[in-house]
Image (cartoon, rainbow, N blue to C red):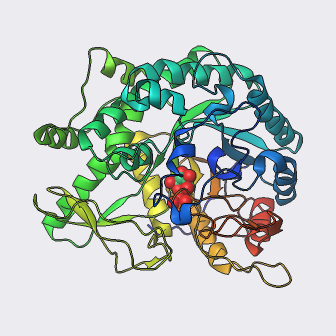
Amino acid sequence: MFHKQLKDFPKDFLWGSASAAYQVEGAWQEDGKGASVWDDFVRIPGKTFKGTNGDVAVDHYHRFKEDVALMKEQGLKTYRFSVAWTRIFPEGRGEVNQAGLDFYLALIDELLAAGIEPMVTLYHWDLPKALQEAYGGWESRQIIEDFTNYAATLFEAFRGKVKYWVSLNEQNVFTSLGYLLAAHPPGVTDPKRMYEVNHIANLANASVINTFHEMEIPGKIGPSFAYTPNYPINSDPKNILAAENAEDLMAHYWMDVYLWGEYPIAAMNFLKEQGIAPTIEPGDMELLRSAKPDFLGINYYQTATNAANPLDGVGAGKMNTTGEKGSSEETGTPGMFKKVENPFVDRTNWDWEIDPQGLRVALRRITSRYRIPVMITENGLGEYDKLTDDHQIHDQYRIDYLSSHVHAIKEAISDGAEVLGYCTWSFTDLLSWLNGYQKRYGFVYIDQDENQDGSLTRYKKDSFYWYQEVIKTNGQNS
Ligand code: BGP
């Protein structure tokens, strides 16, 4: 569809940026914080690029005032960050650690004083180690109660101050990478366990959303889904079907549950045939259907292009975590689909396909299928950046990436999508879970190299000033 004229961004559009506790805070053992599963996982040789970890990360815990001052200078309307569960409950449950709560209260007050709306993610993957050890973390239904209690503690503590809440960040990623690819903790490769864990996470998500509404917390809550829209490689009907399979098993399998409380039929039948469908107990579906998110958060980075894949075809493959272009392997789900290269788009050095129009496709699909407002909770470009001798970072490639995605959002809004806000990933550079510190996303460069050496000094990149102008003109100059 070509529009004669595009609509403006809504007046109260939330121009923002995002981070996650483990990736920025550091201070991993300070002020009573307990250990998370990531604190252990990064110490297993070979799991992360060059063994990088978040012990210090970018020291946001000690430098948050400086970081918020930079956000204010840029004009951010919202800042999305996650709370480390282990700062609030060092053992995952029991007594509240007041010092942990105080850190986030100080951050929230600093943001509010700067005119920035805090957006809190309850869970961005740093599960308390104590819960993993006590009952296998997400593998036990006990987590539903513990996660709900932790969430309710934050709802009450930040009531009236925080109006936007994200329940689970990328449930599809932490369950698949944790239990299918062994790339995240607990490092398991077992599809049956993955689907069991995922079902329990769905129940925990629903319970937290219901609790938020029962407590009458002023504000909105929703999960953030990593949505990778699926295309077929061509119009060969078997490839069209492969793309449908991928959309059902990789996207509807989460989004239908969040918004309708239903699993997609074809995907569920496939899992049953394979003997890996989750155990559904009486009352589960009622709980899933009862929870109504106020928005759907999406993290959008790329699309996936698909072709048919026979039952004895390609399965899991190696990811590119080194920044060596072309080093990722083909992946797929035998009997359903395999991911192939899209000949029409460029790729980053980490082999992520650059497809701004895919964001418009994503927003339109969600709007048509679910009729729910969308919060774009992540979008950005991970690339090498170079600090010049006079401390500049000329990241025109990042400006091009973000600018084309802002344009795609504007087109989607003109198509009729309701978009509440746009958080780029990320505000400052930060630790990439598996790719260390060389894959950078921020508007603000941090002097920290892939060997974790550096002064941690902050430098504004060219993209910092570009986004400042976008915000100032409410997306007119992008
Ligand atoms: C998302 C995560 C973020 C962030 C981002 C970039 O999946 O929610 O935490 O890491 O991806 O990914 P990466 O660091 O692997 O490039």
Asked if 439 appears above or below 213 in the picture, the reply is below
Residue in the picture at 69% in, 49% down: 13
Residue in the picture at 34% in, 53% down: 181
Asked if 241 appears above or below 350 in the picture, the reply is above
Quadrant of picture, ligand 1? bottom right
Look at the image and tell me whether residue 141 can be seen. Answer: yes
- Horizontally, residue 86 falls left or right of residue 197, namely right
Look at the image and tell me whether residue 20 can be seen. Answer: no
Q: Where is residue 327 in the image (x, y as percent from the top left)?
A: 39, 76
Q: Position of residue 17 (x, y in %)?
A: 68, 54
Q: Quadrant of residue 304?
A: bottom left
Asked if 65 appears above or below 435 in the picture, the reply is above
Asked if 280 appears above or below 297 in the picture, the reply is above
- Horizontally, residue 328 falls left or right of residue 373, namely left
Instruction: Out of 369 and 79, give the one closest to the viewer.
Output: 79
Q: In which quarter of the image is residue 457?
A: bottom right
Instruction: Out of 405 and 352, give the one closest to the viewer.
Output: 352
Quarter of the picture holding the N terminus? bottom left
Q: Position of residue 344 (x, y in %)?
A: 38, 80
Q: Quadrant of residue 455?
A: bottom right
Residue in the picture at 57% in, 38% down: 36
